[in-house]
Image (cartoon, rainbow, N blue to C red):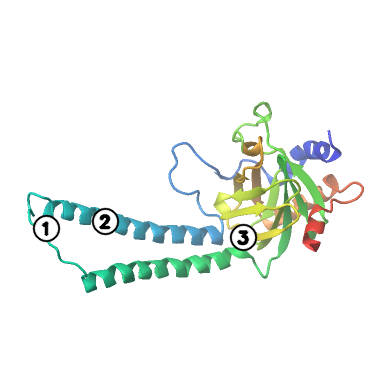
Amino acid sequence: MPFGRLLSALGAMLLMAVVGTGSVSAAQPRPWEMGMQPAASPVMDQMEGFHDLLLVIITVISVFVLLLLIYVMWKFNAKANPQPSRTAHNTVLEVAWTVVPILILVIVAIPSFKLLYFQDRSPDAEMTIKAIGHQWYWSYEYPDDGNFTFDSFMKYDDSLEEGEPRLLATDTKVVLPVDTDIRILVTADDVLHSWAVPAFGVKQDGVPGRVAEKWVRIEEPGVYFGQCSELCGVNHGFMPIEVHAVSKEDYKAWVAEAQEMYAKVGEPDTTVANAEAE
């Protein structure tokens, strides 16, 4: 077993005693659930607002088209209209069915571009973490808090504790403070991976040799789950993400423990540094 994995396994229980366990609600998929998970960040808040706008637009369009089809079938069927009209080139109608879709697209485009720019990056990030995808697990670096690193593997069924979700729980948790603008750098060291946490509104591909950037500001303490969302190989479905959001005070206490538990041994991993240099 790699030394990093051994440290992760030995330190998981100790660190969880510092950050807490299941005392807060978890954001995760639930049976028969419809809609999106509750938003836990400003980005996801705006995504939900944009989704609600699109839902109204597509509902109005669908109802209009349905009523139009019903009217046409009733008004212009062969029995009611045995002599079909040969009217053509209705200028008003042709202008309307060109202009109205353009206006709809403009209404959609303006908030869409605003959202794309808003979720792209935070110019005033207060801290940075790095997520590196591997076949098939994640590793994390905390460059602002001592540059320690650890690996995070999915828990198998026989190691799950009470209340931990199957295929989503990990042996080592990502711990982040609430009410903090956090820059998330994502990359990979073998194939394409994707770091995705639905409650944060974050889904970022990790590309070998390149570093992509997203950001998050977690609004409420809790446990948030995600998964790799890129088809990265045979065990693609077994590299989940588990994030524990805690208060800033609890985060400082966790960092103090993590700096000792996950201190790098030997030469540091330069995967992300090399990618940034390119």
Q: Residues within 10 Å of mark 2 (few under 14, many from 20)?
A: few
The amino acid type of the residue labelled 2 equals Val
Q: Which residue is mark 2?
A: 65
Name above or below for residue 27 compared with residue 46: above
When asked about the image quadrant of residue 25, the answer is top right
**How far across and how far down the image is residue 207, in percent?**
70, 53
For the N terminus, give its image quadrant. Answer: top right
Q: Residues within 10 Å of mark 3 (few under 14, many from 20)?
A: many
Which comes sooner in the sequence, label 3 or label 1?
A: 1
Going 49% across and 59% down the picture, which residue do you hit? 47
Name above or below for residue 165 compared with residue 81: above
The amino acid type of the residue labelled 3 equals Arg
When asked about the image quadrant of residue 24, the answer is top right
Describe the element under mark 3 as helix, strand or loop.
Answer: loop
Which comes sooner in the sequence, label 2 or label 1?
A: 2
Judging depth in this view, the residue of 45 and 78 nearest the camera is 78
Name above or below for residue 252 compared with residue 9: below
Question: Which mark is drawn over residue 57?
Answer: none
Judge depth for marks 2 and 1 and give the one in front. 1
Which comes sooner in the sequence, label 3 or label 2?
A: 2
159 with respect to 32 (left or right): right
Describe the element under mark 1 as helix, strand or loop.
Answer: loop
Q: Residue furthest top?
A: 158
Mark 2 and mark 1 residues within 8 Å of each other at the beta carbon = no
Question: Which mark is drawn over residue 217?
Answer: 3
Judging depth in this view, the residue of 245 and 158 nearest the camera is 158
C-alpha separation, residue under disc 2 versus residue under disc 1: 21 Å
C-alpha separation, residue under disc 3 versus residue under disc 2: 41 Å
